[in-house]
Amino acid sequence: MSLLNRTLPQWYVLVAKSLTHKRVSALLHKLNLEYYLPVQRQLHYWSDRKKWVDVPILKPYLFLYSTEAGRDILFNTTSAFRFLRFDGKLATASQREIDDIRLLCSYGSNIKLENGQARAGDKVNIVAGPLAGLQGLVLQQNGAHKLQVQIASLGRFASVEVESSYIQTC
């Protein structure tokens, strides 16, 4: 790895152990490291009450924006997470992917994370509504348009239903 890559910050992908998202994010905050835990506010119902809850949508992933030197600080702090690797290299996310995830999290509809590669379909831009500017692939499912936004660094994609009038093919 070149010296330039060691000094430029990147979005590293962290994999948190089960049910430790809040603990890991608190640790990153305490160490003054920039991170992003993708959460969406969802209404949950119980038999006696209902409550708005911040739900991590990319379980078990968090993102750390750091240089390699800053990343090395975490190796000695806790075993509540590990760095995701693809082909022997640390997985990183682009700023565009982080911005797309943030936009998805701000959308009012529940987001469902799906495994696998995006299926063949039309590449589209969303031209209206709260997700305007997002690009993705469209599937027809039960008569509704379903937009898939690929997050290549995770090998996954998020999907959300979008009104067909908001979609324009590329």
Image (cartoon, rainbow, N blue to C red):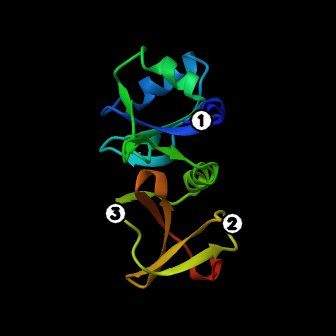
Residue located 42% across and 20% down the image: 75
Residue located 37% across and 82% down the image: 142
Crowd class of label 2 (few under 14; some 14 to 19; many from 20; radius 10 Å):
few
* Mark with earlier residue (3, 1): 1
Identified by mark 1, the residue type is: Ser
The disc placed on residue 116 is 3
Which residue is denoted by mark 1 in the rendering? Answer: 2
Identified by mark 3, the residue type is: Gly
Find numbered disc 2 in the image and state the secondary structure of the residue it sits on. Answer: loop
* Mark with earlier residue (2, 3): 3
Residue located 51% across and 74% down the image: 137
- The residue closer to the viewer here, 139 or 130, is 139
Query: Can you say whether 49 is above or below 76 in the image?
Result: below
Identified by mark 2, the residue type is: Gly
Mark 2 against mark 1, which lies toward the viewer? 1
Residue 151: x and y, percent? 49, 57
For the C terminus, the image quarter is bottom right
Which residue is denoted by mark 2 in the rendering? Answer: 133
Residue 12: x and y, percent? 51, 38
Mark 2 against mark 3, which lies toward the viewer? 3
The image quadrant of residue 22 is top left
Residue located 63% across and 54% down the image: 96
The image quadrant of residue 108 is bottom right
Crowd class of label 3 (few under 14; some 14 to 19; many from 20; radius 10 Å):
few
Residue 121: x and y, percent? 46, 81
Q: Is residue 61 left or right of residue 11?
A: left
* Mark with earlier residue (2, 1): 1
- The residue closer to the viewer here, 141 or 84, is 84
Find numbered disc 1 in the image and state the secondary structure of the residue it sits on. Answer: loop
